[in-house]
């Protein structure tokens, strides 16, 4: 999966209804955009000092000579705070560097209006890349710390998450068992290519269950592995727990750093399925003081249910970082969560003409492959 960002000329009235007003600079200092004489009030030095947890931060703030300088200094310090919290939690080091954010020159010109960018998380390490690599850094570390010798997880019959979990297991010389859920009746073909082919290639074993059959098979598989003397470790579908979501809180800091150097985005658009990417990105941005709207495109659930799930997971992620202060609800509010469900089509993974057109446009205009279930939708 990749993340999409929009800049300039973009306005959807739904954002006005669902999102709070935010300053163009996307910093924690909303007053910094006001002009002197128009109601702007510069915080006294004693108040500003409350933001400074270290002598370096205090020194940086003391040299702020304009409201914009002050806003940038406070936002920078908030990001450093999130970075320190993330670095304190053990993880594997699959991701060696920030993935690039590229301007989509051809698509921006073709479609008009918005200036479009893409964060190339399709280039992440492990077999085939994709968003789950970031989550698995934390989850696989937890498995190793627990003394596990086998990873067990679940996903759809062509799951990207299952492919990358099997890839991480192979990298770490661990066993892997995948529970494949046939969410659309008759969709599983044992001879299918794609991700299904890679499961066996990476050494994983599989079990196929009908829709809703994962919990029962999870209990059976874990018991069977333990009876065989194995030490299995369960990873939730999509790796979307508060621990896994830290991977996208970390990715959020990459977006913040890019925006600080090149200018802010008007919106960040991403897939919203199991929820870890959406919740982690939202938690990381808000904890770092960045108010950029984050728009989740649901791949399965109705918007109200998906939004409730994302809100809970984002707040759990903030709490995992220990950055909630007065409470995680003060960092991520209900109005921060925007979910659009009109692109699901007839159902999860079922193709639409619009999805096929989007995939073709990205391939022919930007030489980037989207997938039909997530980024294509």
Image (tube, rainbow, N blue to C red):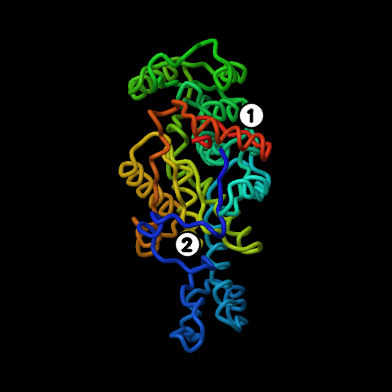
Residue 184: quadrant of the picture: top left
Q: Is residue 71 above or below residue 355?
A: below
Q: Is residue 221 left or right of residue 354?
A: left
Q: Is residue 313 left or right of residue 265?
A: left
Q: Is residue 112 left or right of residue 339?
A: right
Q: Looking at the rendered structure, which numbered label has been put on residue 127?
A: 1
Quadrant where the N terminus lies?
top right
Residue 363: quadrant of the picture: top right
Kindly tell me whether residue 40 is visible in this rendering: yes
Q: Is residue 292 left or right of residue 109?
A: left
Q: Is residue 239 above or below residue 61?
A: above
Q: Which residue is mark 2?
A: 291
Distance from disc 1 to disc 2, alpha carbons, whole Å, reads: 33 Å
Front position in the image: 120 or 139 = 120
Residue 8, position as x, y percentages in the image? 56, 60
What secondary structure is found at the residue carrying circle 2? loop
Kindly tell me whether residue 98 is visible in this rendering: no
Residue in the picture at 45% in, 66% down:
22
């Amino acid at each position: 999966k990749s993340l999409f960002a929009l800049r300039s000329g973009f306005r959807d009235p739904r954002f006005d209804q669902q999102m709070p007003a935010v300053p163009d600079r996307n910093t924690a200092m909303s007053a910094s955009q006001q002009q002197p004489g128009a109601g702007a009030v510069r915080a006294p030095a004693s108040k500003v000092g409350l933001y400074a947890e270290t002598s370096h931060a205090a020194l940086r703030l003391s040299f702020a000579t304009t409201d914009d300088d002050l806003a940038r200094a406070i936002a920078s310090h908030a990001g450093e705070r999130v970075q320190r919290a993330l670095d304190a939690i053990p993880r594997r080091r699959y991701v060696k560097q920030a993935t690039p954010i590229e301007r989509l020159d051809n698509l921006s010109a073709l479609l008009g209006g918005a200036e479009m960018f893409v964060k190339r998380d399709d280039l992440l390490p492990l077999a085939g890349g994709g968003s789950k690599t970031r989550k698995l850094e934390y989850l696989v570390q937890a498995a190793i710390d627990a003394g596990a010798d086998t990873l067990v997880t679940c996903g759809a019959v062509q799951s990207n998450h299952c492919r990358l979990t099997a890839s991480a297991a192979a990298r770490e010389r661990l066993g892997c068992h995948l529970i494949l859920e046939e969410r659309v009746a008759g969709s599983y073909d044992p001879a299918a290519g794609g991700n299904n082919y890679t499961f066996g290639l990476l050494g994983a074993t599989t079990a196929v269950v009908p829709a809703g059959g994962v919990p029962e098979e999870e209990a059976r598989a874990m018991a069977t592995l333990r009876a065989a003397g194995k030490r299995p470790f369960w990873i939730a579908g999509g790796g979307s727990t508060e621990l896994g979501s830290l991977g996208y809180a970390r990715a959020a800091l990459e977006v913040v750093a890019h925006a600080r150097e090149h200018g802010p985005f008007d919106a960040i658009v991403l897939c919203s399925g199991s929820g870890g990417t959406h919740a982690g990105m939202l938690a990381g941005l808000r904890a770092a003081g960045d108010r950029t709207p984050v728009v989740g495109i649901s791949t399965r659930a109705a918007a109200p249910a998906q939004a409730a799930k994302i809100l809970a997971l984002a707040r759990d992620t903030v709490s995992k970082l220990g950055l909630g202060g007065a409470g995680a609800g003060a960092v991520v509010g209900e109005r921060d969560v925007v979910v659009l469900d009109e692109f699901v089509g007839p159902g999860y993974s079922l193709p639409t003409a619009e999805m096929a057109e989007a995939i073709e446009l990205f391939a022919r205009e930007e030489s980037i492959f989207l997938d039909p279930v997530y980024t294509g939708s």
